[in-house]
Each structure stands twice: as C-alpha cells, then as structure tokens.
C-alpha cells in the first residue's frame, strides 16, 4: 500500500559557484585567457576593464532607493547587484610584480616548414606521373613525426582505393616507397628502427669517399644480421661470432652512434604551439628575501557592464513597471548574478593559488633559496592542506598543470611533492633526494662496468639510506635509465 510521509536528511551538495571555482582552479594560466573570453562571449553583463567608479555610478549609488514592493512585484535592491568592493587585489599593487607590458605580449609563433611540408617539397625531384604522385602523397601522409611509416602497406592500399579512387598493388606501392626513402633526412619512410639505420648506413657508404670503409661495412653487417644481439649489447658474443677485435667493434659502434634513429625529430611538427610554458607564479630572490608574485595573466580586469548598470538604474527610476520590463530586468539580474559569480570565482582562484603556493614556498624554503634538489623535504598534498586549511582535492587542483618560475628554472608544482623514506638515523628524507643521488651514481659510474641494481642498493645503504633493491629498480625506471647491461660501453 502506498503511503505519503515526510522525511528529513542531511546532504552535502556543491553549489554552481563552487563547481565553477573548482573548474577554474584546474585551468592553467595558458588557458585562463581563453576561458575568460568564452565567458565574455556568453555573458553580455560581463565586461573587461577595471571597475572604476565614475560620476554616474556615484550619483546612482546616492539616489533614494525605492520602497520595498511585494514579492510578487519582483522588485530588488540594485546595490545588491553592483558591488562597492570590487577593488584591485593587493598583490597587483606590489612594485615587484611582473610588468603588464611584459606579460601581455602575445607568444610569437614561428612560421616554419613542417616535416611533412619538407617531404612534399621533394616530390618534384623524382620522376613520377600524376597517379604515382597521389600514391607518394598517401605514403608521406602516413609517415609519423619521427619519420617512420608504421602503417601497414595493405592498409595504405585500401586507403588509396577508398579515399583517392586509386587502385594499386603491393609491388607498385613498395617501389614508390623506395623512392620516398631516398628523400632527406636519411632514414625517412623506414618501417622499423633496423630499416632506418640500414638506409642511413647504405647511403653513407655511397656518399663516402672511401668506398672500402671497413667500419661502415661492419656496422651495416651488425645491423642487418645481428640487430637483436647488438641492441642487447652482447658485445662479447658479437666479437666471437664475427671474429673481430674489440677495437674494430668499437669503431663500428661509433658509426652507428652517429646515425639518427628518429630522422623526423629535427623538424617542426604540426603542433606549432608546443614547447611554451607560461608560469603561474614568479619567485624573485632579493638578497635572500624570497618574494612570490602571481602572474598578472591570472588576474584579468573584469567588471559588470556599464550598459547593464544603466538599464537597472533606469528601471529603478521608472514608476511604471509593466510585465515586459519585469521580464527584461529578470534576465538582466540573472546575467549580472552570473557575472558576479564569475568575477568572485576568479578572485577566489587567485587567493587560493597564492595561499597554496605560499605554503609550498615556506615548506620547501631551503630548496627555493639554494636550488639544491637534495634540500627538498618530503611533502604530500595533506601537508599543504593542513597548513592552508583547504581540502586535499583543492590542493591537488592547484598543483595540476601549474608552474612557478624561479632563478633556477621553471618547475611544475607537483615536482615539489614526494613521498619519504627513513635513513638509518631515523630521519625522513624525500624520495626525490634519493633519486638525485641515484642518478649521480649512475652518471659517475665506469661505463665499461656499469653498476647493477644490487650494487647501487649497497652504495645507497652505505650512505645511510634504508632502501630495497626493487625500490632502486623502480626509481631507476622512473628516471628513464636502462639496466646495467644496456648502459655498458666499450
């Protein structure tokens, strides 16, 4: 049987303003400008510029407010929608802040020839008819930014038939691919690292004045016949199988090391905006006094549109308020509310970012003062959350995709967060400090006899770091350092 009853329960729900703030916290400086532009486009009540109090505003603020009307009349107090405290944030008044002139400059995008443009420009150097040019262009379009053709030839045959209405066979496609492989840079169009190196070695022998170059021929043989053994650096096995000396092998390896395993890496890619980092914070060291400022790109000048203020003023002065005017003013109220929420969210974003970064600065003060990576203290999100009184998820959003510019370089904020391990003395040190020492040990090792993970572990234990071998292997992999066998050199 159905019954009606009243229930009471307590729930936590995020308001639209809180959701908007969380989304803005995640946006890096490089994308904030675009986010503000999007809001300006969708909300006509939001305008760019400082919220200056002109004489009209003063006159409007001093006018007598209309008497309260009934709730059904949908009246409102205009002063609730025009804030008097939209002042400039304190940090924007600091003399050591970045100059707006410097920060508002647009990032120059160089007009350069891309890798694929470079390949297309070489099509006129080979003798191909119109149909074969279409096939060659399809092959070039399938080459990735590293210079490799990783798409199956059978798939390219299908692509030509369905998209270009060009029907070809594998033999013809392979023949045209060989022509493309004669393009610069050497090795382009290869289907594997082995083929890439072989193309370069064969061309190098043709271009060499010394046609009897033993080292080049031996290098070609190494790649062609013993590629797997060579890649795994089984040098003793190669010397025995090829009946050569260690010096001869070393000269052949030197020839291989001169080659480019990624022939397309030296050219511009289609993404011409990569490689630029806009810092969210700027840290200046004034004779040992660290001064943190927020990049002014994070503090756009926004205000409520004067036109909307005038419309609300006119409505307030109007004695007759018909239905259409009430509907119009309701729309204006909604837009102004939305604009105020966005401006408040931007200000709160700035304050949250500054508070969080200030806490990180104080926690890692020794590092920011010296730039010594070993001075980094163990720090997790919870540590900064407790200092600032913010939620861990909020700190995580602040650290996401944010950068700080220091005299030692530009760092991502998450760089300063790390777990800890205990030394023999019971002191907690950052895992980043251990990684730095591990990296230094590998850099200084004898490359003829590189240190194994166990030897690296023993050395770290001798230095007082209580660490397991599997942990050393994990840190080595995180540093993109290969195992000892692959680090061996002759």
Image (cartoon, rainbow, N blue to C red):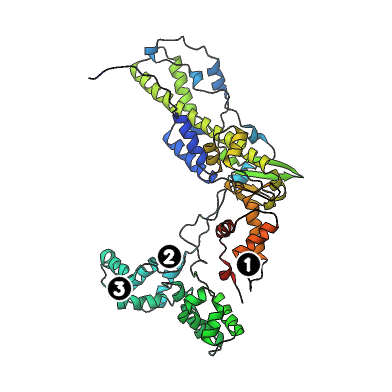
**Res 317 visible:** yes
Q: Earlier in the sequence, mark 2 or mark 1?
A: 2
For this view, does 237 lie left or right of residue 369?
Answer: left
Q: Earlier in the sequence, mark 3 or mark 1?
A: 3
For this view, does 60 lie left or right of residue 175?
Answer: right
Residue situated in front as seen by the camera: 252 or 182:
252
Q: Secondary structure at mark 1?
A: loop
- Which mark's residue is nearer the viewer, 2 or 1? 1
**Res 207 visible:** no
The quarter of the rendered structure image containing the N terminus is top left
Q: Secondary structure at mark 3?
A: helix
Picture disc at residue 272: none
Report x, y in % for residue 170: 30, 75
Please name the residue shown 51% across and 32% down the image. 345
Q: Secondary structure at mark 2?
A: loop
Q: Earlier in the sequence, mark 3 or mark 2?
A: 3
Classify 10 Å Cα crowding around label 1: few (below 14), some (14-19), many (20 and above).
many
| Quarter of the view holding residue 389 | top right
Q: Check disc 2 and report the residue beneath it.
A: 144
Report x, y in % for residue 45: 45, 29
- Which mark's residue is nearer the viewer, 3 or 1? 1
Report x, y in % for residue 317: 45, 15
Q: Check disc 3 and report the residue beneath it.
A: 131
Q: CA distance from mark 2 to mark 1?
A: 36 Å
Q: Is residue 21 above or below residue 281?
A: above
Residue situated in front as seen by the camera: 27 or 467:
467
Report x, y in % for residue 19: 46, 33
Q: CA distance from mark 3 to mark 2?
A: 23 Å
Please name the residue shown 36% across and 19% down the image. 7
Picture disc at residue 451: 1
For this view, does 403 lie left or right of residue 291?
Answer: left
The quarter of the rendered structure image containing the C terminus is bottom right
């Amino acid at each position: 049987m159905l019954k009606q009853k009243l229930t009471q329960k307590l729930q936590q729900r995020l308001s639209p303003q809180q959701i908007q703030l969380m989304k803005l916290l995640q946006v890096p400086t490089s994308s904030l400008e675009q986010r503000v532009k999007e809001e300006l486009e969708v909300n006509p009540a939001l305008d760019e510029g400082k919220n200056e109090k002109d004489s009209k505003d003063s006159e409007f603020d001093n006018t007598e407010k209309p008497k309260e009307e009934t709730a059904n009349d949908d009246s409102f107090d205009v002063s609730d929608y025009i804030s008097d405290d939209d002042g400039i944030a304190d940090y924007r008044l600091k003399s050591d802040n970045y100059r707006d002139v410097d920060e508002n400059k647009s990032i120059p995008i160089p007009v350069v020839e891309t890798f694929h443009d470079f390949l297309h420009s070489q099509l006129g150097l080979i003798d191909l008819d119109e149909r074969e040019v279409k096939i060659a262009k399809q092959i070039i379009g399938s080459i990735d930014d590293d210079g490799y053709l990783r798409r199956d030839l059978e798939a390219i045959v299908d692509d030509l038939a369905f998209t270009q209405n060009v029907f070809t066979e594998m033999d013809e496609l392979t023949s045209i691919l060989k022509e493309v492989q004669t393009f610069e840079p050497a090795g382009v169009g290869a289907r594997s690292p082995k083929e890439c190196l072989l193309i370069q070695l064969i061309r190098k022998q043709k271009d060499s004045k010394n046609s009897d170059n033993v080292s080049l021929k031996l290098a070609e043989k190494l790649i062609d016949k013993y590629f797997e053994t060579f890649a795994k650096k089984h040098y003793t096995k190669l010397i025995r199988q090829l009946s050569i000396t260690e010096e001869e092998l070393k000269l052949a390896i030197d020839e291989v090391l001169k080659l480019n395993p990624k022939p397309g890496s030296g050219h511009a890619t289609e993404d011409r905006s990569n490689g630029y980092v806009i810092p969210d914070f700027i840290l200046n060291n004034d004779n040992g006094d660290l001064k943190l400022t927020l990049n002014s790109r994070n503090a756009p000048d926004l205000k409520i549109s004067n036109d909307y203020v005038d419309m609300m003023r006119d409505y307030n002065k109007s004695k007759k308020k018909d239905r259409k005017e009430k509907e119009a003013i309701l729309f204006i109220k909604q837009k102004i509310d939305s604009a105020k929420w966005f401006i408040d969210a931007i200000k709160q974003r700035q304050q949250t970012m500054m508070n969080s970064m200030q806490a990180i600065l104080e926690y890692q003060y020794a590092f920011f003062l010296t730039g010594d990576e070993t001075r980094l203290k163990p720090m997790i999100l919870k540590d900064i959350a407790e200092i600032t009184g913010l939620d861990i998820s909020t700190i995580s959003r602040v650290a996401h995709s944010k950068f700080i510019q220091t005299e030692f370089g530009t760092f991502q904020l998450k760089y300063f967060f790390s777990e800890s391990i205990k030394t023999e003395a019971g002191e907690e040190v950052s895992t980043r400090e251990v990684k730095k020492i591990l990296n230094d040990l590998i850099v200084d090792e004898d490359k003829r006899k590189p240190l194994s993970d166990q030897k690296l572990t023993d050395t770290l234990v001798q230095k007082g770091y209580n660490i397991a071998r599997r942990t050393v292997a994990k840190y080595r992999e995180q540093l993109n350092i290969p195992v000892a066998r692959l680090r061996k050199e002759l």
